[in-house]
């Protein structure tokens, strides 16, 4: 994206070019549709544009903080709940969970609709899905602690990585293997002091957010794909193929019952404040 060569004034005016009230910059190509849904619910006409990566987006955040630029940034929260040096500003909107995937995959309604489409009939997966979500989250709790500590104390170690494949019980599994997880934890524990781990434990115990919202979003994707395949097979007897891109297409419109979902309601209410400040 060539926007970084533009003046702040040109970046601010982009929304007007598209006949929108405000301009919102987001990190990558997966993000505009997610944020467009939320801004539409908040009834704010926004031109939403990705900037091609987190490092690029940091430059836009810096323009807001340093120059009070008249555009907005919508971004993943990552582990900012637990960090001290985060940028806070009314023009910076963050996801409730680690990233958009934590919201995309959180509601069984979205997954149930996806499974139903593959089965070509309405199915009820609420029990299966909720049990899986609880088990999956509890199985990676120690990884969450290490990942937060990794960010907070700047260790530079890959904890979650980009997917959960290496931690699953098998290639087609949607369950975390405790043996593989424990082996990995033992391999990275020497990089952290007991005080660092204790500090993060206290932070996690003090947060009101469900642990699910502290898992790196991309880490969840492979397990969700395997879960959907298993649920389709269970309810239709048919095996399916499902890619991450197709999963994105099926789950990106995740606004159903948003008013009763804290992960959506909190963010949408934050977006709604833009109207009041305008």
Image: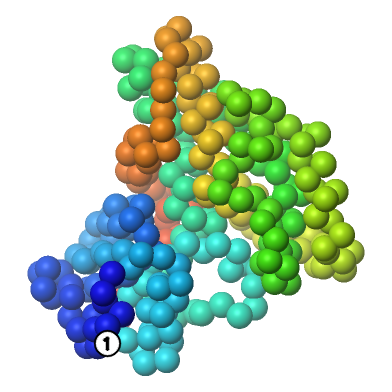
Secondary structure beneath disc 1?
helix
Of the 4 image quadrants, the one containing the C terminus is: bottom left
Q: Is residue 121 above or below residue 202?
A: above
Task: Please name whichever residue, 258 or 251, is drawn nearer the observer in this view of the structure.
Answer: 251
Residue placed farthest to the right in the image?
194
Q: Is residue 202 above or below residue 102?
A: below
Image quarter where the N terminus lies is bottom left
**In the drawing, does residue 273 fall left or right of residue 233?**
left
In the image, taking residue 121 as reference, residue 136 lies left or right, namely right
Nearer the observer, 172 or 136: 172
Q: Position of residue 205 (x, y in %)?
A: 75, 58
| Figure colour scheme | rainbow
Q: Position of residue 173 (x, y in %)?
A: 61, 25
Whether residue 7 appears in this view of the structure is: yes
Residue 195 at x, y percent in the picture: 87, 68
Position of 133 with respect to 235 (left or right) is right
- The image quadrant that residue 247 belongs to is top left
**Residue situated in front as seen by the camera: 247 or 202:** 247
Could you say where residue 97 lies in the image, as x and y percent from the top left? 53, 56
Residue at 79% x, 60% y: name it. Answer: 201
- The residue tagged 1 is 8
> What residue is rendered at 18% in x and 73% in y?
15
Is residue 18 shown above or below 213? below
Q: Is residue 275 left or right of residue 158?
A: left
- Exactly how many numbered labels are in the figure? 1
Taking the view exactly as shown, the residue that stands out farthest to the top is 237
Whether residue 92 is visible to the viewer of this picture, yes or no, is no
């Amino acid at each position: 994206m060539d926007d970084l060569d533009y003046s702040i004034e040109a970046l601010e005016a982009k929304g007007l070019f598209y006949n929108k009230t405000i301009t919102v910059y987001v990190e990558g190509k997966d993000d505009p549709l997610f944020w467009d849904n939320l801004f539409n619910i908040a009834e704010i006409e926004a031109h939403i544009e990705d900037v091609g990566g987190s490092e690029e987006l940091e430059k836009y955040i810096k323009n807001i903080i340093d120059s009070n630029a008249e555009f907005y940034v919508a971004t993943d929260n990552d582990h900012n709940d637990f960090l001290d040096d985060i940028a806070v500003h009314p023009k910076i909107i963050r996801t409730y969970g680690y990233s958009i995937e934590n919201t995309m995959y959180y509601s069984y309604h979205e997954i149930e609709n996806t499974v139903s489409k593959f089965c070509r009939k309405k199915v009820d997966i609420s029990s299966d899905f909720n049990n899986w979500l609880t088990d999956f989250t509890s199985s990676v709790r120690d990884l969450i602690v290490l990942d937060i500590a990794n960010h907070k104390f700047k260790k530079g170690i890959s904890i979650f990585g980009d997917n959960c494949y290496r931690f699953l019980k098998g290639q087609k599994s949607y369950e975390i293997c405790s043996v593989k997880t424990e082996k990995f934890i033992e391999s990275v524990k020497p990089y952290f002091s007991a005080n660092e781990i204790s500090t993060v434990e206290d932070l996690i115990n003090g947060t009101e957010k469900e642990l699910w919202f502290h898992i790196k979003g991309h880490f969840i994707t492979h397990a969700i794909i395997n879960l959907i395949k298993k649920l389709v097979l269970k309810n239709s007897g048919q095996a399916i193929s499902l890619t991450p891109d197709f999963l994105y297409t099926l789950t990106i419109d995740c606004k159903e019952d948003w008013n009763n979902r804290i992960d959506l309601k909190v963010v949408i209410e934050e977006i709604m404040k833009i109207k009041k400040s305008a």
